[in-house]
Image: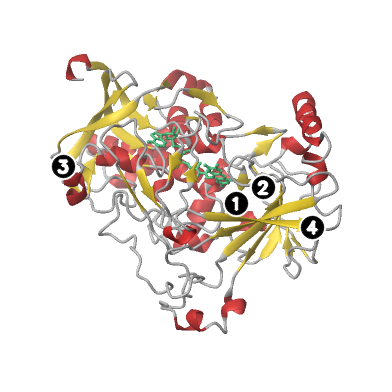
Amino acid sequence: MGDTTQDTQSFDYIIYGGGTTGCVIAGRLAERSDASVLLLRPDHQGRRVSQILGTEADWNIQSEPCAELNDRKLHLGRGKFLGGSSGTNGTICTHGIKQDYDDWNMEGWSGDEMFEYMKRVENFQSTDWFVAETVVHGANGPFFKGFPIKDDMFTTGESPQGCGHAVRSIYKGIRTCSTDYLDTAESKTKVTIISSQYVCRIITEPNGEGQKLCATAVQVQDASGASTIHKATKEIILTAGVYGSPGILLRPGIGPSAELKELGISPVIDIPGVGENLINHLVMLSFYEVSKPGLTNDHLIWHTRAKEKIIQQYKESRTGFMSQFPFGVFALTRFDLRLKDVELWQKSKRSNDRDPMNTLPNQPHVEFWNTECYSPKYRFKDFPPDNKYAFAMATTFFSTRSRGEMTLKSTDPLLNPKVQHNFLANEIALEGAGTKDIIAADDDVAVVDGNICVRGVGGLRVADASIMPTLMSGHPQMAVFAIGEKAADLLLSSCALQICKNLHMPQTQIGVYRTLFL
Ligand SMILES: Cc1cc2nc3c(=O)[nH]c(=O)nc-3n(C[C@H](O)[C@H](O)[C@H](O)COP(=O)(O)OP(=O)(O)OC[C@H]3O[C@@H](n4cnc5c(N)ncnc54)[C@H](O)[C@@H]3O)c2cc1C
């Protein structure tokens, strides 16, 4: 490989991973500074791919067998194209509960601050039937009887119980995704995008400023093995997602020393938490047949030629059933009342005012939603024929206590990692396992600090879903977009700080200099 390695030009910032946060950061840097930005991506497809699961537009990561799920191996779909998982997700936009972010206990990342960043992400367009942020009394429909209806409850960050509508990232029938950040004149001139490039090495140099090392360049290779070095004069930002970024740190020796040695990698810096504390929302779909017509949407999709018709309608006018992600009503709830007499719940370990799931009364335990659009490939094959009706009820588990891990199968950057999620291994619902200890996201294992800088390495940050210390009580894309926005702020303010230092100005004048960039 050494012989074929060539130097190319330098860029101020190198971002690896053109997914959700990668595009946000590149777009914001282009808009708010004169910096040159290289957005490197291993994938090569366009944007907004309609069907990805199991195709070449999917990373097709398969988990290790999950003991509590009868040793099932789970398919972990991830978008392998510009826009990443924001271009393939279910478009559900929920913000979580402000307390979720307060629980991260990180300066600058509180609930109020994250909600400000989410506001920044949104270009909200309402409809005449949606009552934004207004509480509506009463029940509507048989499934969530007893819940108060709060139309916009998934955006306020203050409702742990109730049912309402979840806003979608779709406008006029077209999915919006992070690539929209690149559709500006500034991005077109300042962001260079190179596809089909896998990072095989982060190049570090000794650093005089308190850190042992400073990341200065990345060595990338394409599928043929030809490699190139790209230099960053300011910073390198990893945005390869939960299953991508840890591997990129491990390969050049940034991670747990013992594990690295087992993989035949010489440790460069010992950071035990790389690949640990892996958390994901577990969504379980249960299928129900209903006896009466009119309660489900089968007639719009599965019954006589319905699918052909709705596809045709969508192609012609971008309207109808296919123009939205047709999930039904969403609800949040807590289990306190149902579990109050359960011995395991009563006896389980608690800290401060928190329950055994480590939540406060203002945070939900689960979310329910229903749909008739179940993916035939992985979930359900027996669609209801005419005159039969069925729906899937999805349960999303929040504040899950199970923690998994991911590591490398080999040092080959083209190979997917080994992923063990341990779903349900520590859940209170499983008899006897509710008091197991979990890996806490404390300072000893944390990979990045509050400024998302990799500990001990200068010039290197991680900015994607993998930096969340704990999950928020909602679908994560809005929080991930907010991470991208926050990362851009941090990069630009640290650049302003550097200018102050170079000019020997006091840091209190940073506000003046921020205006140059923001
Ligand atoms: C099928 C699906 C449905 C979802 N539905 C919803 C929803 O309805 N609502 C919601 O809020 N959230 C949803 N999510 C979650 C949400 O979309 C993601 O959490 C978020 O987009 C992750 O952003 P990211 O920047 O961390 O990673 P990504 O957007 O996945 O970006 C990672 C980028 O890095 C690249 N990359 C580089 N190397 C690697 C590697 N080795 N492995 C993997 N990628 C690599 C990828 O190609 C990609 O471009 C869904 C996710 C999926 C997969």
Residue 167 is marked as 2
Assign a secondary structure to mark 1. Answer: loop
Query: Which quadrant would the N terminus be assigned to in this image?
Result: top left
Q: CA distance from mark 4 to mark 3?
A: 59 Å
Tell me the crowding category of disc 4: few under 14, some 14 to 19, or many 20 or more residues within 10 angstroms, Cα based. few
Residue that numbered label 1 is attached to: 94
Q: Is residue 14 above or below residue 189?
A: below
Going from N to C along the chain, the mark reached first, 1 or 3, is: 1
User: Which of disc 3 and disc 4 is earlier in sequence?
Assistant: 3
**Which badge, 2 or 4, comes first in the chain's sequence?**
2
Residue pointed to by mark 3: 268
Question: In the displayed structure, does residue 2 sit left or right of residue 386?
Answer: left
Which numbered disc, 2 or 4, marks the residue closer to the eye? Answer: 4
Q: Quadrant of the C terminus?
A: top left
Q: Which labelled disc corresponds to residue 290?
A: 4
Instruction: Say if disc 1 is inside 8 Å of ligand 1.
Output: yes
From this viewpoint, is residue 132 visible? no
* Marker disc for residue 444: none
Is disc 3 in contact with disc 2, using a CB cutoff of under 8 Å?
no
Q: Is 426 positioned to the left or the right of 334 in the image?
A: left
**Pointer 4 and pointer 3: residues touching (CB < 8 Å)?**
no
Query: Can you tell which of label 3 and label 2 is closer to the viewer?
Result: 3
Q: Residues within 10 Å of mark 3 (few under 14, many from 20)?
A: some
